[in-house]
Amino acid sequence: MSMKPIAHIYNDFPTKFGLPRQSGMSENLISRIIMEKEYRNPDAFRGIEEFEYLWLIWLFEPMGKREWSPTVRPPKLGGNKRMGVFATRSPNRPNPIGLTRVRLISLEQTAADGPVLTVAGADLMSGTEILDIKPYLPFADSVSDAATGEYGPDKQEPLNVEIPESVASLFTSKQLSALREALSYDPRPGYQTDESRGYGFAYGGYDIRFRVSGQTATVTDAIKIND
């Protein structure tokens, strides 16, 4: 069996650290999906605007030559608890395929790239390969009272986020809202609790530096990343 990407997704997160851990956690994170040339036929998108949400099937970033393990240690569970790989969303799996629900904002026909989808709420880093796009059907895809183990939204209290004006002024209001959402869910691994330690991730062309103290994440600096 062979597969090839039909598109790539682009947004303000060029690296994995800092990304929302699940789709829908940052509804302000806007991404653009640009199709490969052979899939730019407008007919392939006929009717897609009738759907509010879409499923993206995609490939995790290349992980090199690594043997898959039947158990993994999810960082958000502290990094010490082992769980079966099929009971987690770890990228270290036999076939590194991801599934993400996104909200469709628009479909635009462009001269340079053909049909371009703008979506919100993705948890994919910029440049990720998309294998397929399917409509989201609430009556078939949603079970509101399903058990979620230790991954439910009620398992973590969001952090307060403080961003100085000197940093906030670097971004659009939408970018700033997405940055706040990313920080509120605490990007650090669950086993990192040292309040004196600084962290950073790439976002919107800047290295965002922050610290976490108690229930507050404070941005300390934003350093321009040279292209």
Image: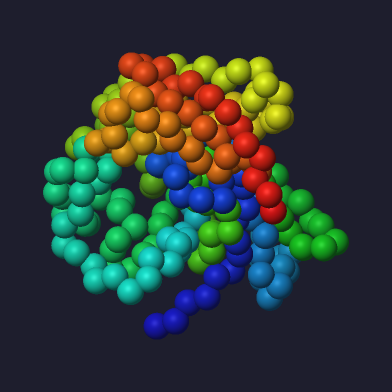
Residue shown at the point (67%, 60%) measured from the top left: 34
> Residue 199 occupies which quadrant of the picture?
top left
Residue shown at the point (20%, 54%) measured from the top left: 72
Which residue is the extreme one toward the right?
111
Residue shown at the point (30%, 61%) measured from the top left: 92
Viewer-proximal residue among 69 and 148: 69
* Residue 79 appears in the picture as rendered: yes
Q: Coloured how?
A: rainbow
Estimate the x, y position of residue 175 in percent, counting from the top left.
Answer: 64, 32
Residue 177, above or below 43 = above
Viewer-proximal residue among 7 and 12: 12
* Residue 51 appears in the picture as rendered: no
Residue 9, above or below 138 = below
Please indicate whether residue 63 sits to the left or right of residue 71 in the image: right
Please indicate whether residue 53 sits to the left or right of residue 65 in the image: right
Viewer-proximal residue among 137 and 205: 205
Residue 176, above or below 132 = above
Estimate the x, y position of residue 40 in percent, counting from the top left.
Answer: 71, 68
Estimate the x, y position of residue 94 in percent, counting from the top left.
Answer: 28, 69
Please indicate whether residue 4 sits to the left or right of residue 111 in the image: left
Please indicate whether residue 87 sits to the left or right of residue 123 in the image: left
> Residue 173 occupies which quadrant of the picture?
top right
> Residue 1 occupies which quadrant of the picture?
bottom left
Viewer-proximal residue among 116 and 192: 192
Residue shown at the point (37%, 71%) measured from the top left: 64
Estimate the x, y position of residue 210 in percent, counting from the top left.
Answer: 48, 28
Which residue is the extreme one toward the bottom?
1
